[in-house]
Image (spheres, coloured by chain):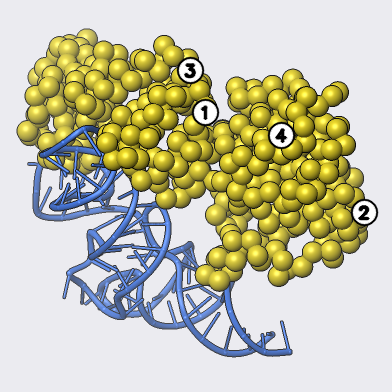
Amino acid sequence: MQVSGRTPEEQLEVFRKGAAALASEEELLAKLRRGKPLRIKYGCDPSRPDLHLGHLVVLDKLRALQELGHRIIFLIGDFTGRIGDPTGRSRTRPILSREEIERNAQTYRAQVSRVLDVGQAEIRFNSEWMEQLGVSEFIGLCSRATVARLLERDDFRNRYRSGVPIGLHEFLYPMVQAYDSIALEADVELGGSDQHINLLLAREIQRSVGQEAQVALTLPLLEGTDGVEKMSKSLGNAVGITDPPDEIYGRTMSIPDTILPRWCELLGRPEWSEVDALRKQVDEGRGNPRDLKGALARRLVERFWGSDAANAAEDRFDRLFRRHEAPDDMPEIEVALSGGEGIPVVDLLTRAEFAASRGEGKRLIAQGGVRLDGKPVDSAEAQVEPGQYVLQAGKRRFARIRVREPI
RNA sequence: GGAGAGGUACCGAAGCGGUCAAACGGGACAGGCUGUAAACCUGUUGGCGCAAGCCUUCGGAGGUUCGAAUCCUCCCCUCUCCA
């Protein structure tokens, strides 16, 4: 396989564009000059197969590198996944069975294929070599790293300082990761900037066993919809690439204006000229950030669902949130009267799952957040007779309710 | 192994015998405003009940007391220092 006609220097530019760190350019250039496709490793966590926009930053880079003719290797950390990770931030990380990992890997593959050519990529599992590795050999490998070095990682350092427990196995994971690079003979490894230390550590370990060090390429971490924390499913600030169009559109619209430039920077694509134009206007203080946000949201939906879906998502959003009108499609719920002359509105709220308990439903009503056919419900004791109604809770939850006569 | 500090609601964190369904902050939800599900302001935030009230909750299990998140015993878990 031949690498595309680009010169090593031109290729370097592709690697470098938008990167948070690249260690080191000289080594990368040397590798590129050999003219052979590079083996580019990217590690994935099999316990979280749902990809979000934060992953997209890295995946887009992988795609660009793949288009240069390099070999992308997805490493699924099934071995690590089976050990589990009961401490620290990811305390809910489950211990996965073989079947679950296999299933997650499939999900993962399907999602990745929306961004790049999976057929051209290599998918590997680290149990392949980790299960062969003996304890003595692994401990020997560990002797090549130091605790101080591991503590350089932000996450560890902060937890150590603030007294949050760090499991010993968490210290071992970077070593496993390093060994993965050795086993795969990785030329380059990609990751988010939180992975920087790990990728550098792998370089040292590779060298210590006489292997050429991988180039460590990290990309900025995208902040989530809260505008502060990095995007992560467990923080609830993520926009998934398989989320429904309305979700992608709406969640994007909810990001604070302050990180809008950042999102444009990290998620934007050259062909999104109208986004660039609006961004320029906003930068100059002329445009309305709302419009820029809308344009970006539209493009993101379009990217994963096509332009029809993007139009529909935009329409729905404008209708619901700008003009405060009811959507034309809403869940339908049928309720049978159980006797008596009517059914309390509070019960409709719980039936529609707009309130988790009757108490919550009453609070909603008391706050003026409940409407029936557009008219505010003013009493917690309000009842409804058989018929059809549109029930609304808050600004955006709607349901069509059909109350039937008792049988 | 020794010494000390802790484990509280979705999260962080106060409370240290009754007035505690538990301050405060974040999150979430609702209302207002708006340029938007942004920002800002206001409110709500265990369950059942129209209500009075009842039930469940402060790491776990027992105990003391009219009464326990608060006191005692044992257990589990975490952190810090020393070895």
Are the residues flagged by discs 4 and 1 in contact, CB closer than 8 Å? no
Nearest to the observer: residue B16 or residue A39: A39
Q: Are marks 4 and 1 on the same chain?
A: yes
Please state the horizontal and vertical placement of residue A23, each as a whole percent of the image. Answer: 72, 51
Q: Position of residue B35 (x, y in %)?
A: 21, 33
Instruction: Give the image location of residue A306, x and y in percent.
Output: 47, 15
Kindly identify which numbered label has been placed on residue A269: 1
Amino acid under disc 3:
Trp
User: Disc 1 on helix, strand or loop?
Assistant: loop
Residue at image position (69%, 45%) is A217
Task: Answer whether labels 3 and 1 touch (C-beta < 8 Å).
Answer: no
The colour assigned to chain A within the rendered structure: yellow
Residues at marks 4 and 3, CA–CA distance in whole angstroms:
33 Å
Instruction: Rate crowding at label 2 as few (under 14), some (14 to 19) or many (20 or more) other CA atoms within 10 Å.
Output: few
Q: Which circle, 3 or 1, is nearer the viewer?
A: 1
Q: Residue A305 bears which disc, if any?
A: 3
A211 or A134: nearer the eye? A211
Mark 4 vs mark 3: give the one in front. 4
Q: Amino acid under label 1?
A: Arg
Residue annotated with mark 4: A10
Chain B, chosen colour in render: blue
What whole-number distance in Å separates the C-alpha atoms at marks 2 and 3?
A: 47 Å
Between B48 and A313, the residue placed more toward the observer is A313
Q: Residues within 10 Å of mark 4 (few under 14, many from 20)?
A: few
In the image, is residue A199 above or below residue A113? below
For marks 2 and 3, the one nearer the N-term is 2
Residue named by callout 2: A210
The alpha-carbon separation of the residues under discs 4 and 1 comes to 19 Å
